[in-house]
Image (spheres, helix red, strand yellow):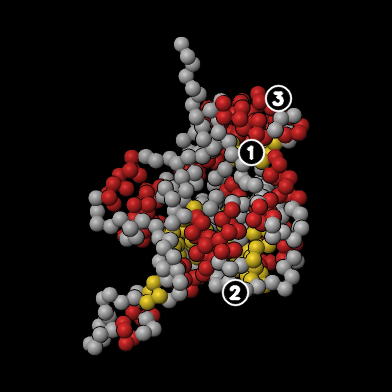
Amino acid sequence: MASSSPKQLPYGRQTIDDADVAAVMQVLRGDWLTTGPAVDAFEAGLGKATNARYAVSCANGTAGLHLASLALHFRPGDAVIVPAVTFLATASAPHLAGADVIFADVDPATGLMRAGDFEQALSRAGDRKVRAVFPVHLAGQCEDLATIRAIARSRDITVVDDACHALGTRWGNATVGDGQYSDMSVFSFHPVKTITTAEGGAVTTNDPALFESLRLLRNHGMQRDPSRFAQADMAFDADGEVNGWYYEMAEPGLNYRLSDIQAALGTSQLAKLDRFVATRRALVADYDRLLKPLAPRVRALARVPQCIPAWHLYVVLIDFAAIGCSRGQIMKELRGRGINTQVHYVPLPMQPYWRARSDGTQFPGAGDYYARALTLPLFPAMTAEDVKRVVDALTEEIGA
C-alpha cells in the first residue's frame, strides 16, 4: 500500500471558524456589500484593540502605507528612511508618493533597524529633507520605539510604523498602534497575519488632521461634508439645502476602501485576537526550547528588551556554511517532508530597482541577516506536535 503524503504545514495561514463564516453570510444577506456599517464597526474595534483614537481601514497593508505616505504630501527633495530588511511595499509606497528613499542597515541578529542605523542613514541625506521614518516591526518584534521617536522629534521627522507584522505587540506600557511613539501605524490583514480580512489593511493615528486626510485619500479625495464645501454656489440650492448629488474633490485620491464583507470577517477575527496571540507565543516558546540544542548553528532571532511580540513569523538564523548545506537545499528537503518554509526578506538594496539607484552604501547587517534567515511554520492551528515535527526534521537535515 502506498504511503500517504505527509500533512502539509505552510509557513503561515488563516484560521477561520463558523463564527467568521456566519459574520460574512450576514453581510451577504444584507443591504451593504461595499463600505458601510460593518466597516465602521471594524474600525471602532480596531481602534479599541490598539488603543488608538482613530483607525482608517483600507484595501491592504500596501494601500495603508501608500495612504500614510500621501497624507504627508511629500515635495521634491523630501526623503524617508526605510530599513533595508522589509517587504517591497515599505519603500515603494513613499517612493510612489514622491519621496526619495534612504535605506538604513539593521541588526543582523534581529533584522530590525537600530537607533544607530537610523542616525547613520540620516547622515547620508545630504541636502534632502528627511520627512519621515518607517520603522518595521519585523516578525512581530518592535524596534526601540522611544529612542527612534526621540531622534525623529529632534529633527521634525514623522514616524510611520510599518506594523503589518505586529498587531497585538506591546513595548513597555505601549501597544503598537496606540500613537505613543508614532504618528501613524500601518497594519495588514492578509491571511498569514495575526487576524485576516482576506485582503485588507488599516492605518491608526491620534492626529485628527491625518485622520481626515486618510479618509479622504482612500475614497478618491471625495468630500461630502457640507461644512467643508468650498463652492457654496454649486453645493446648495436657493433655500440653502445641500444638493443631494453634490460632492467635491478636495485632493486627488484613490479607491482604497475596504468592503463590508471583509470588515465583517475582520470584526469576527478581532474577537479572537488575544487567543491567536497567546497561541502564537506558546508555539514560539516551544520552538525556542526545542531549538536550543542546535545552537550555535541554528539560532532564534535575538529578543528585543521591553518588547512583548505578537509573533507573526518564526525566523531562525542558520549558519549554512557550518552545516555544509545551502538554504535552497534545506528548504527543498523540508518541503519534501510537507514542511513549507520561506525567507523574510531579500534586503531591498539588493533588488534591481534600488541597486540601480544605489550610492554604493553597504548594508552588512542586512546582508548577514539575509544570508542566514529561514522562516519556519507558525500559525494558530499548529500544535506542539507540529512544532516538534518541524524541529525534528530540521535537526535531521542539518545532521545534528
Residue drawn at (46%, 35%), measured in percent from left and top? 381
Query: Looking at this view, is 387 or 247 the one in front?
Result: 247
Could you tell me if residue 48 is visible in this image?
A: no
Q: Residue furthest top?
A: 1
Query: Looking at this view, is 258 or 210 the one in front?
Result: 258
Residue drawn at (33%, 43%), measured in percent from left and top? 21
- Amino acid type, callout 3: Ala
Q: Examine the rendered structure and indicate whether residue 209 appears above or below residue 81.
A: below
Helix, strand or loop under label 1: strand
Q: Which residue is mark 3?
A: 400
Helix, strand or loop under label 2: loop
* Residue 282: % across, % down: 54, 38
User: Along the horizontal axis of the image, is 242 left or right of 86?
Assistant: left
Q: Residue furthest left?
A: 239
Question: Disc 2 versus disc 1: distance between alpha carbons?
Answer: 39 Å
Do the residues under discs 1 and 3 have CB atoms within 8 angstroms?
no
Q: Examine the rendered structure and indicate whether residue 282 appears above or below residue 49.
A: above
* Residue 97: % across, % down: 55, 66
Question: Disc 3 versus disc 2: distance between alpha carbons?
Answer: 55 Å
Circle 2 crowding by C-alpha within 10 Å: few under 14, some 14–19, many from 20: few
Query: Looking at this view, is 268 or 171 the one in front?
Result: 268
- Amino acid type, callout 2: Arg
Q: Examine the rendered structure and indicate whether residue 222 appears above or below residue 95.
A: below
Query: Looking at this view, is 92 or 58 the one in front?
Result: 92
First in sequence, mark 2 or 1: give its number.
Answer: 2
User: Along the horizontal axis of the image, is 105 left or right of 145?
Assistant: right
Q: Examine the rendered structure and indicate whether residue 200 appears above or below residue 280.
A: below
Helix, strand or loop under label 3: loop
Q: Which residue is mark 1?
A: 374
User: Residue 270: which disc?
Assistant: none
Q: Which residue is mark 2?
A: 75
